[in-house]
Amino acid sequence: MDSNNLRYDKRGVSATKDEVHAAIKHLDKGLFPNAFCKVIPDISGGDPAYCNIMHADTAGSKTSLAYLYWKETGDLSVWKGIAEDAMVMNLDDMACIGCLDNIVLSSTIGRNKSLIPGEVISVIISHTQAFLEKMEKHGISIVSAGGETADVGDIVRTIDVGYTAFARMKRSDVVDINIRPGDLIVGFSSSGRSVYEDAYNGGMGSNGLTSARHDVFSHHYATRYPESYSPEIPESVVYCGTRNLTDEVKINNDSITVGKLVLSPTRTYMPVLRPVIDRFRKNIHGIIHCSGGGQTKVSKFMPPDVCIVKDNLFEIPPLFTLIQEESGLGMREMFQVFNMGHRLEIYLPDRSAAEEIISVSHSFGVDAKIIGEVRPAETAAIEIRHEGKSVTYSF
C-alpha cells in the first residue's frame, strides 16, 4: 500500500468504495441493471409502462469545510452551496437516466445544536427553494416535500445535510448505459461560470473533500476547531497543508479565497441536459456523472471488452492544481479522487450529434468537447493521457 492510500485509510475514506460495492453486489439491480440509477417497477402507480426512481445522497464532509469558513468569516452564504451540493448529488445522478421531471425532494438534516444555530438551517432550507425555482425556469420540475431536521449532537459533530429524491417516469424514456466500441465521449467542464451560476465555479463536486480539506489547509485549524474532524484520525494527517481559508488566489483577473474555491458548489448539468436529452435521447449510449471515483467512475458501467481512452481532456482548473501541489498526489490518484475538470460524460457514436450537443452546452456557458473515445480491447481498461503523461486503470 502506497503512502497516499495509507493517508486515505487513516482518514477513514476511500476513492473506490470497494467495500460498499461488495456489500450491495448481490442486491437486485432493478429494471435496467446497467443504468446509472436503480430503476424499479411503478410501485406508486402500478402502470407497467412506468417506473420509479428514488435516490439519496448528502453533501458529505464538505459541510465540515463550510463550518470552518463560516466560523472564521461569519459568511453564511457558504451554506447555500452546501444545499446545492446535497441536491445536485441526487438530481444529476437521476438526470443521467433521463429523469428531469416530476421529481419530489425531501431533506434530512442532522445537526449539533450547540454549534449550528437556526440561522444556518434557515439558509439551507430557504436556498433549497430558491434553487428549485431556478431549475423550474430551465424546464426541470422539482417539488419540495419538506423534510426532517434533527438535533443529534451526540452522533453528529457539526452538521450533516442530505436529500432524498423520488420520481415517476416512462420506462421508454429511461436512458440506459450500453457503451460500445466506436463511441465518442463528450465531456462537460466542471469549472468556469455558466449562465445559471452566480459566480466562478472552481470545479469541486462533493467528492474528495476529506482529502482536499486536510491536504490544503493549515494545521492550526485542528487546534481552533477540533469539532471539525474525527478524533480517531491521527494528528499527522489532519490539516496538513499550508493555506489559510481566506488566502486569495487570482483566477481570470478576479480574486477568490482558497476556502471559497474549494467550497465551489457542485455544478448541476440539468439545464444543459434538458434540451440534450429531449433532442438526442435515442442517440445516447450512456451518461456518466463523474462523482465518486473521478475519471474512473465509468468503470462501474463499462463492458469487459473495451478500453476507454481519454486523451483530449480540458486544461486542469487552478483548483485541482492547487490541491495537487499541496497534497503531493500523483496523476493516478488525482484522476481517481477528483473530476479534474469535467464531471459529466455522454457516450454516443454520432459525431454530428456530439457536435450539436457541444453547441447546446456552450449556449449555457458550459464548456464541452470530445474528450476521448471507446476502443475494443481484450480486457476492460481506462487510459488517461494528459500533458505528455499517461496512466492506465485495469478492471
Image (cartoon, rainbow, N blue to C red):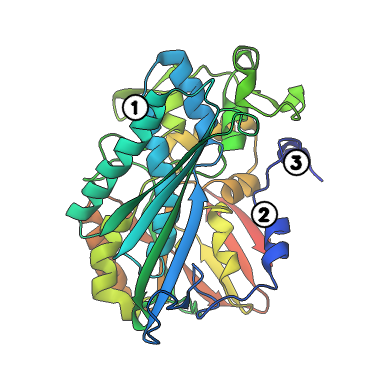
Please tell me whether mark 1 sits on a helix, a strand or a loop. Answer: loop
Q: Amino acid at mark 1?
A: Ser
The x, y position of residue 308, in whole percent, is 55, 68
Q: Residues within 10 Å of mark 2 (few under 14, many from 20)?
A: few
List the residue tagged with mark 2: 17
- Of the two numbered discs 2 and 1 on the same chain, state the one appearing first in sequence: 2
- Of the two numbered discs 1 and 3 on the same chain, state the one appearing first in sequence: 3
Observer-nearest of 150 and 222: 150
Please tell me whether mark 2 sits on a helix, a strand or a loop. Answer: loop
Please identify, in this view, whether the residue under mark 2 or under mark 1 is nearer the observer: 1
Q: CA distance from mark 2 to mark 1?
A: 31 Å
Q: Residue at x 56, y 52 (%)?
A: 292
Q: Amino acid at mark 3?
A: Asp
Examine the image and state in which quarter residue 300 appears. bottom right
Please tell me whether mark 3 sits on a helix, a strand or a loop. Answer: helix
List the residue tagged with mark 1: 77
Q: Is residue 285 left or right of residue 228?
A: left
Q: Residue furthest bottom?
A: 48
Q: Residue at x 46, y 32 (%)?
A: 262
- Of the two numbered discs 3 and 2 on the same chain, state the one appearing first in sequence: 3
Q: Amino acid at mark 2?
A: Lys
Query: Is residue 287 visible from the viewing direction of this image?
Result: no
List the residue tagged with mark 3: 9
Figure check: 347 above or below 328:
below
Are the residues flagged by discs 3 and 2 in contact, CB closer than 8 Å? no
